[in-house]
Image (cartoon, rainbow, N blue to C red):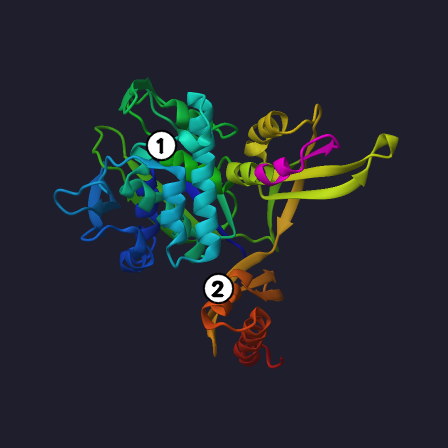
Amino acid sequence: MAKLLYIDCSSGVSGDMLLGALIDMGLPVERLQAALADLLPEGCSLQASRVERSGISATQFTVVEPAGAGPDGHHAHRHLSQIEALIERTPLPVSVRRKAIDLFRRLGAVEAAIHGIPVERVHFHEVGAIDSIVDIVGAVWAIDQLGVSQVVSSPLNVGAGTVETSHGRLPVPAPATLRLLEGAQVFSSGTPLELVTPTGALLVTGHATSFGPMPAMTVRQLGYGAGSREIKGHPNVLRAVMGETQETGAQSAVAVLECNIDDMNPQVFGYLIDRLYGLGALEVFYTPIQMKKSRPGTLVTVITPVHVRDAALDVLFQETTTIGVRHQEMLRECLSREWVTVSTPYGAVRVKVAKRGERITNAAPEFEDCAQIAAEQKVPVKDVHAAAVSAYLDLAQPATGQK
C-alpha cells in the first residue's frame, strides 16, 4: 500500500510546525540532528518539547543557537549560491539535497520576480537564517525518511492583518508567500496574524500534489506540531496524518504542457529545465522534431502538479521564444515506493523498491549513491551498482524464496 501524508493546514503552516508534527509522529529528533549536523553552526542544537495549544498536546520544534551567535545567527543574509553550497556539502541523500535546492531556487525566482532583480542578486533575510534553512532541509529529509509516496494538503488558512518583515510592514499573506501559494487552495479565518509563513508555503506547495479534504486512507500515524505562540481561541497547531491508501497505486491529477520551438538559442534549454524543476515540475524533457520548412526543432514537455501549471506557463512564455503552449490535465498512477539500504563491499547503498499492491515490480539502486561511492572508493560505478543489486537480491531471497 502507498504511504500518503495529509497535512491539515486549517490553522496555518510554518516550517517548524511541519517538522514538529513529523517528530510528534515518531521521527526521533536525534536522527534529525545527526542528519543535519553539517548544516549546524558549532554549539547549535535541535530540540523538541511538549507544549499545549488550546488544549491540544503538540511538539514544538526549535533550533537552539549558542548565545551571541554571529553571522550564522537568526538575522544572517545569504545569497542563493551560499545556501546551495551549504546544502551540497552535507552527506544527505542526493535526492534530498536536490529537492531542497530546488525549493530554494523556486523561492529565489519568486523573490527575484517581486523585486525585479536577477535571481543572482537575491539575498534571503528570514529564510536565509539557519533556523529556516534547517526547517526546509529538515522537512525534506523527514518526508523522504518516512517513505511518503504522496502528499495531500488541506486548503491553507493564511490569516489576516499585517506582518513586520525586513522590508517593513506588509499585508498578510506577504507578497512572497502569496506568490508561492499560486494554484493552491487558500482561505482566511480572519485571525489577525500571519498563519502561513514563506517556509510553510514553500514546503507544502513543493510537496503536495493536490489540495482538499482528507482522502480515503487507513490512518497509521498522526502528529501535532505547535506554533510558537499561544493564540486565544485558536489552536495554533499543524496536524499531520500518515495513512495507507487502498488503491494499487497513488493516483493524482497532473498538468501536461507542450510547445514546439525552432528559433531559440540552445543554451537557454539548460536554464529552462532548472527554472521548471525549481517551480516544482515533476518531469521536463525535450524531444527532437521536424517542423515546417524542414527546420529541426524541439518539443518541450513539462509535467507538473495542477497547482503549478500557471507558474510553469509563465516561465515558458518568459524564458522561451514560443508564442503558444498546449496544456491538458491527466491522471497519473504511481507505484508505491520505499527505500531499502543494503551493505556492499564498497559501502551502504539505497535501493528504491516499487510495489503495485503487495507485489514488488521493480528494485533499483540509487545511482547517485553508487556514483558517490565509486568516486570515493576509486572503483568503476558499474561494479558498485552490480554489488548493490546482488546485495538486494540476497536480502530479498528469504522473503520471496527465489533470486
Which residue is painted at 30% across and 23% down in the image? 191
The residue carrying mark 2 is: 372
Q: Which numbered disc covers residue 195?
A: none
Mark sitting earlier along the chain (2/1)? 1
Residue at 22 percent across and 30 percent down: it is 231
x and y, in percent, of residue 275 in the image: 54, 36
- Picture coordinates of residue 79, whole percent (x, y): 37, 36
Residue on which the image places disc 1: 123
User: In the figure, is residue 75 to the left or right of 141?
Assistant: left
> Label 2 crowding class (10 Å Cα cut-off): few <14, some 14-19, many 20+?
some
- Amino acid type assigned to the residue bearing label 2 in the image: Gln
Residue 318 figure quarter: top right
Nearest to the observer: residue 309 or residue 157: 309
Q: Residue at x 49, y 37 (%)?
A: 213
**92 lies above or below 230:** below
- Residue at the far left in the pictured view: 67
Instruction: Say which quadrant the C terminus sits in.
Output: bottom right
Residue 120 position by quadrant: top left
The x, y position of residue 128, in whole percent, is 32, 37
Residue 96 visible in this rendered orientation of the protein: yes
> Disc 1 on helix, strand or loop?
strand
- Residue 320 % position (x, y): 64, 29
On-image quarter of the N terminus:
bottom right
Above or below, 39 relative to 279: below
Task: Give the extent of the magenta segment.
Answer: 257-271
Spatial CA span between label 2 and label 1: 31 Å
